[in-house]
Each structure stands twice: as structure tokens, then as C-alpha cells.
Amino acid sequence: MPVRLRITLLFGSIVFLILLLVCGSVYYFSYTERTNDIILRLTNRAITRARLLGQPNFDQHVLRAIDSSTMMALKDKTLQAYNYLGQKVYTYSDEPSDTLTVDKRILEDARVKGRVYFRIGKKEAVAYHHTDRVSRLVVIAAAYDETGLEKLQQLRNILLFSFLTGSIIAFAGGYFFSGRLLRPIKQIADDINEISAQNLARRIHSGEVHDEWQYLSETLNQLLNRLQESFDMQRRFIANASHELSTPLTSISSQLEVSLQKDREAERYRAVMQSVYQDVRHLGKLTQTLLEFAQASGNTGGLEIQPVRIDEVLLALPAEVNKLDPDYTVALSFGNMPSDDNALIVFGNTELLSLAIRNIVMNACKYSDDHKAIVMLDTADGRLTIAVEDKGIGIPHSELRYIFQPFYRVNHTGSTGGFGLGLSLARRIIKLHKGEITVSSRPGEGTLFRIILPAGQF
């Protein structure tokens, strides 16, 4: 069922029930009020006649004259009185031929209950039991409330008309307003249908009104921004990875092809094999780096998460870096250390965290004249801050925003080795651990990286 129709039915049904409750309540209370009013009037008439009939030697002809001259809004009035033996002792009616045939059970109920309300044909009647020292009478007063019933009928017609009209207006209005309410959804859907992987620059119009639809549009636009960024990064990554992989493969193929064209001396073959071996090692390192990059580009679902003492990771850095390159040195500096060791714990993957920090430290050593990196650890406000500083050549300000892109290398670093994946890999690992990484640098003075991780969270 379409959403517009469901909204219309829901809105119309709610208004339908409200109108039914209101109209039903008005009619019920009006009906009850009219019934109570005629019961009261008939009861008062019966009480008055019973008292008059109870007077000794009271002339019934005079009472009939009084009844005939009494003006009431009721029609076809009838009065009948019965003694304790059930004998009719008095009768009056507007029409001489109009008499009431009363069941004896009604008279008995009146003697027990004092007053009984009942209907005889179109008339309403009250049987009232009057007792005093002189007599015990049951007086029945009956009449037809033509005016009251006509007013009740008019009220019923008005309420029925209002109920039906209100219900129709509710359903029609619900259908109209639901269409206007859902119009932004349709516009959003139309805009999304025009967006594809080749046209990710298109965005959804969010409108001027600050409502839920604008919030939805802005949220979808933010999602599209992330998708576009991801697709652009993926395209650049695939293009750069293809180039980086094809270069050593082409070199290996060319050297082997040239060496097989004619017989050569053993020393020449040895030189070719040595060159091919270097290319294979380069290719192996690149493949390993790409695998690590792919692992860090996923989500935390497939990672082994455990508590990690960040100070222990840093303490292992000097030995790891020196093992990779004996010329590199790392100086550790632990500043504001907490008294509680648990404040130094982060939840994450030890190997990935160690890899991210090591990549930044290796970069700092690589681009420093003294091949030295200073690593500082500080804790504050439930966060761990790791600062990696070097006194190297620095990074131009115009290139700072590109250094975390895969395969990007600063122009003046062409003479150094590497694939341009270290910083990008480090940033993705830090993001996986809900942290952030920033960099500041001055050319010729050095570079400072800051890694901020939430303590005890993942």
C-alpha cells in the first residue's frame, strides 16, 4: 500500500474516531437529559395528583377540571390512579377514548421501588407509589413528548450530517496534505535516481525550511560526499597501485628478456639476477604494504580487539626501528603520566597500532639529517596524545593536505625510498581506533605529528 494512502487512512481514521466519540457523546447526553426531564415532569404531576386524591371527600370532577386546564408541553396526557387492591380509582386523558392498559407487575414494582419508568406505545410513563395515613395509591402519569423527541431528532440529523461531512473532509484533507508532506521525499528520490558512480558530484536540494526533510537531505549529501571521496580515493589508489606494481614487473621482464637474447658470461648473468632479486624484494615489500593498507581500510569487525598499553608499544619502538635500519634512532619522552596505569590503556589491535606509529617514526627518521625522531607521550582529559617530532627538511605548507593520500610523495623526497603509503596507512589505522592525527611543519625546521587516541574506548 502506498505511503500516501496509509497516511490518509491513518489520519482519516483518527478524525473518524474522534468525531464518532464527540457526536456520540453529545447525542447520548442529550438523550439522557431529555429522558430525565420527562421523568421528572411526569413524577411531579403524579405526586401532585396523588396528594389531591388523598384528600378526604375530594371531588374528582374538580380534579379532572384542573387536569384539563393544566397547560403542559406534553401531548396525549393520561393520568390513572390505583388503590392498594389494584382497582382504578381515578382516570383522566386528553382524549376520552385514550386509556392505558397497565400490567399488574408494573403496579407491584412501583409499590416496591417507589417509582418505575416505562413505555406504553409511543408514550412514556411513570408509576408513582404514594402512601400516607389515609390512602395508598399508585398514580400513573403518561404523555407523549413530541417537542422533546423532535428536538432530539433534529440534533441527531445535525450530528449525523456533521459526522459524515467531517469524515469526508478529514479523508480528503489527509490525502491532500499527505501528498504535500511526501512531496520532498519524491523530490529526494528523483534527485538520488539521477546520481550514479559517474555523476557523484550531483547533490540533493535541501530547501530553505529547517525541518526533518532538510535534515534528511543534508545527511544524504554528507553520505554522498563520503562516497565521492571514497570513490576518488579508490580510483587514485588503483591507478597508483597499478603503476607501482607494473614498474618492477616491467623491469624484471625487460632484464630477463635482454639476458636471454644471447649467451653471456656468468658474471653478467649474476648481475642480472642480482638486479632481478632487488626488483622482486621491492615488489614483495610493495605487496605486503598493499595488504596492510587493505586490512586497515576495512572496519573493526574483523580485527582482534584487546586492551593495549600504549606506553609498552612506544617502549618497543627504538628496538624495532633500529632493527629495520641501524642508522635510525628514537628518543622517548613521557610527560604527564597518570598515577593509574589503566589511563594508558586503549582498546584496539596491537599490531596495527604499532605499525601506524612505526610508519610515522620511520618517516621522521628518514627525512631528518641526524636520522633521529623524538616520541613524546602525554595524557589529559581521558585522551592519549603521541607526538612524533623531527628536525628534518620539513613539508611545504601547500603539500600538507596531500600527504595522507595513498602513493603521494612530497616533491623533494624523490631521492628517498618508499611507496607513499606509510602515512596514509597510519591515518586509516588511527581512524579505525576512533582517533585523529594532525601534522604541522616548517620547511627547513622539521615536522610534528600528533596522534590522539581515546583512553579505554573503542
Image (tube, rainbow, N blue to C red):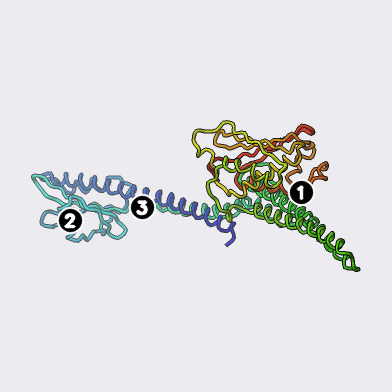
Across and down, in percent, residue 297 comes to 66, 52
Mark 1 closeness class: few <14, some 14–19, many ≥20 residues within 10 Å? some
67, 205: nearer the viewer: 205
Image check: 24 left or right of 99? right
**Mark 3 / mark 2, whichever is N-terminal:** 2
Q: Amino acid at mark 3?
A: Glu
313, 7: nearer the viewer: 313
Q: Are marks 2 and 1 in contact (CB under 8 Å)?
A: no
Across and down, in percent, residue 424 comes to 71, 47
- The span from disc 3 to disc 2 (Cα, nearest Å) is 27 Å
Q: Secondary structure at mark 3?
A: helix
From the image, tell me which residue sits under label 1. Answer: 418
Q: Quadrant of residue 257?
A: bottom right
**Mark 2 / mark 1, whichever is N-terminal:** 2
Q: Is residue 250 visible?
A: no
Q: Nearer the viewer, mark 3 or mark 2?
A: 2
Image check: 436 left or right of 381? right
Q: Are marks 3 and 1 in contact (CB under 8 Å)?
A: no
From the image, tell me which residue sits under label 2. Answer: 109
Q: Secondary structure at mark 1?
A: loop
Across and down, in percent, residue 14 comes to 49, 52
From the image, tell me which residue sits under label 3. Answer: 146
Locate the N terminus and report the quarter of the image it occupies.
bottom right
Q: Nearer the viewer, mark 2 or mark 1?
A: 1
Across and down, in percent, residue 394 comes to 77, 36
